[in-house]
Image (cartoon, rainbow, N blue to C red):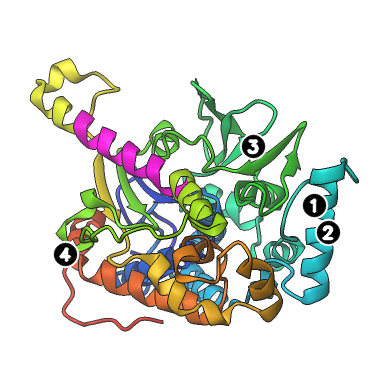
Amino acid sequence: MADGSLQGAADTALILSGGGARAAYQVGVLGAIRDLLDDDAGNPFPVIVGTSAGAINAVALASGAQRFRASIDRLMRIWQGFTTARIYRSDLSGVMRQAASFFGNSLIGLGREVPVALLDNRPLAALLQNEIDLAGIPRALASGQLRAVAVTAFGYSSGQAVTFYQAAEAIAPWRRHRRLGAPTELTHAHLLASSAIPLLFPPVRVGAEFFGDGAVRQTAPISPALHLGARRVLVIGVSGNPLAGAANRLPVLPQAPADNPPSLAQMGGHLLNSTFIDSLEADIELLERLNQFSRLLPPEQRGPHLQPVDVLVIAPSRPLDEIAARHRQLLPRALRLFLSGPGATRASGAGVLSYLLFEAGYCNELIELGYQDAMSRRRELETFLGLPTRRREPAPG
């Protein structure tokens, strides 16, 4: 289908979860979708929702929705050429200066007006300015190639997860327990705020409040897409999910005896996983149960809030922390020195590393994994997106 009209159903949403460098996996899945679409295909996702690094991917797609396949190409080129230095300062002087500022602020109260962070992500701010043309969003909305795009950030003062959304038509704001939707014109500050992992990256002021990573207290990651009119959602996760099908069920590993207490990095990895992964998996499970309940009711008794929601989840078939552990030597030398003490450069601390390792070798392996995982579920994707079955076998990249 040519540009000028939506490729897929008008109520289909794409949900991109958070996870730092793990979001490279999403780009691989998107690459597979690109290869399943016709050359002149329009945007198959009228609603695009993202959180954390997923928010950056989401807005990049929304900005280029009028040339959807080309926007995926551009996003893939960016991720394939990543270095850590393009996201945060990784040189010795930059790392030491930021660490000194962090501990001076935290221990003796120096520079309290400066946002607290272990890493300096000003390179990311420059990258967003250079690579994402936000003027493409209103053009896509006006052309009919996009209905709405949204990103979620966490307000440190209010303690609420705020979904900032930009839509073609007026959509009423919503308010639920510790989460709300706010119509706005998206800026690069919203992306920086949504991807500001607490303590690692500094909070960002948006309006009257400082915001951090949207995965914090985002108890219902799928909900914003439903508020924006979606009834069918494709979720691209960054961790193996037992509800995503047999191909994505990870084996239960035997418990090794613990001779030593967990390192700071190992504990941090579990905290990051609970922030970025657990709420999404719980929300998917809840939605599936509501779908089962809804289908037991006669259609006339369901009402507007109990209509079934079609959900397709694509999630990694292999543990991403194990992949990060194999690539840990790619981390710049200054950062290896800085992170060795907390244990992030050891295999047990690879959970933290999997979020911070913005290096091409690691990102490219995640992209390839995402591509292969999506292609292994090609029939499901074609059915979900209403695409004709194609005989040719696309190639990644």
Residue 91 counted in the magenta span: no
Q: Is residue 69 left or right of residue 335?
A: left
Q: Position of residue 60 (x, y in %)?
A: 56, 60
**Residue receiving disc 3:** 184
Given the image, on which type of amino acid does mark 2 rest? Ala
Whole-angstrom CA distance, mark 1 to mark 2, is 5 Å
Q: Is residue 27 left or right of residue 318?
A: right
**Residue receiving disc 2:** 100
Given the image, on which type of amino acid does mark 4 rest? Arg
Quadrant of residue 83 in the image?
A: bottom right
Given the image, on which type of amino acid does mark 3 rest? Thr
| Mark whose residue sits in front, 4 or 1 | 1
Question: Disc 2 or 4, which lies upstream in sequence?
Answer: 2
Residue in front for this viewpoint, 359 or 348: 348
Residue 274, labelled with which disc? none
Question: Disc 4 or 1, which lies upstream in sequence?
Answer: 1
What residue is drawn where x is 75% and y is 61%? 120
**Residue receiving disc 4:** 379
Whole-angstrom CA distance, mark 3 to mark 4, is 37 Å
What residue is drawn where x is 76% and y is 35%? 207
| Mark whose residue sits in front, 3 or 1 | 1
Q: Position of residue 240 (x, y in %)?
A: 30, 57
For the C terminus, which image quadrant? bottom left
